[in-house]
Amino acid sequence: MITGTLERLETERMVLERLRPEHASEQLRLLLDPRVWTTLWSGGERPTEGEVLDRLAAKVEHWDRHGFGQWLLRDRETGEMVGRGGLQHTYTAGLNDIEAGWAIVPERWGQGLATELAHAVVQAGFDQLGLLEIVAFTLPDNRASRRVMDKAGFQYERDIVHAGLPHVLYRRRRGLC
């Protein structure tokens, strides 16, 4: 169950707030951690601070343009940043889709936060945005992310190439699962 507006949602254990420029230091800490960037960044090389900040600016602009996007995730009890995730437009496998994505700080891996977020993302996408379907994709060997997709009701669709690398594409349709 989620409560709030798209700009600020609450789940059982997290507060999801619209990603903003002032979140730069927290995003750098998250996305420059090698345990995280190796699952998210194409090309196999560590991103630079400038690249992370450019992506943050693009995600802020996505909110301005579309009225939804990625959130900074905070622990409800402590206020500590625990990740980033949400919905965004994507072009992959020759299609324009809305993608669900997530990245959790490694210290909190295995606690179900990504699954909790994925359920909130699906609910917000279908209930508040009226989407008919949402995609998610990852590198084939990212078993943890694939488990999150399965638990959130996404169905494996096919293997694809994204950013020059093999990925697996999952899709969740409204009213299914």
Image: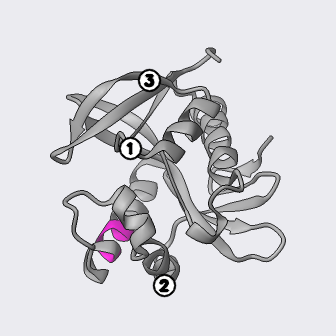
Q: CA distance from mark 1 to mark 2?
A: 29 Å
Q: Which mark is residue 25?
A: 2
Which residue is rendered at x = 38% and y = 44% of the image?
141
Q: Nearer the viewer, residue 43 or 134?
A: 43
Q: Is residue 98 magenta?
A: no
What kind of element bears circle 2?
helix
Which quadrant of the rendered structure holds the N terminus? Answer: top right
Q: Residues within 10 Å of mark 1 (few under 14, many from 20)?
A: few
The mark that comes first in sequence, 3 or 1, is 1
Rendering coords of residue 171 (x, y %) = 45, 25
Identity of the amino acid at label 2?
Ser
Q: Residues within 10 Å of mark 3 (few under 14, many from 20)?
A: some
Q: Which mark is residue 56?
A: none
Label 1: which residue?
141
Q: Is residue 55 magenta?
A: yes
Q: Nearer the viewer, residue 157 or 62?
A: 157
**Callout 1–callout 2 Cβ contact below 8 Å:** no
Rendering coords of residue 63 (x, y %) = 46, 56
The mark that comes first in sequence, 1 or 2, is 2
Which residue is rendered at x = 34% and y = 76% of the image?
53
Which residue is rendered at x = 29% and y = 27% of the image?
159
The mark that comes first in sequence, 3 or 2, is 2
